[in-house]
Image (cartoon, helix red, strand yellow):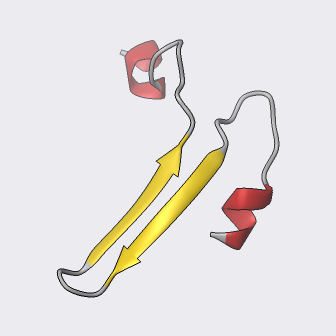
Amino acid sequence: IDTLSRLNHKNLVNLLGYCIEDEPFTRMMVFEYAPNGTLFEHLH
């Protein structure tokens, strides 16, 4: 998480936050909105 939060590049979206829960086991990362679609959409 620390490394991802430090990344800063024009072609990457920024990590805004994260959440770690033990019950139920949940891990989430929140990134900024990418208005031009996903990488998957551009490749297919």
In the rendered image, residue 11, in percent from the top left (x then y), is placed at 72, 28
Q: Is residue 40 above or below residue 17?
A: above
- Residue reaching furthest bottom? 22
Which residue appears at 52% of the width and 28% of the height? 33
| Residue drawn at x 80%, y 58% as measured from the top left | 6
Above-or-below relation of 23 to 2:
below
Quarter of the picture holding the N terminus: bottom right
- Total marks drawn? 0
Residue 22 sits in which quadrant? bottom left
Which residue occupies 68% across, 35% down?
12
Q: Indicate left or right for 7 with 43 as reference.
A: right
1 left or right of 42 in image: right
Find residue 28 and report its image quarter: bottom left
- Name the one closer to the observer, 41 or 3: 3
Q: Position of residue 15 (x, y in %)?
A: 62, 50
Image position of 11 (left or right of 23): right
Kindly give the residue lying farthest to the left in the view shown: 24
Query: Does 41 sit above or below residue 33?
Result: above
Q: Quadrant of the C terminus?
A: top left
Residue 16 appears left or right of 26: right
Q: Residue at x 78, y 52 (%)?
A: 7
Relative image position of residue 17 (x, y in whole percent): 56, 57
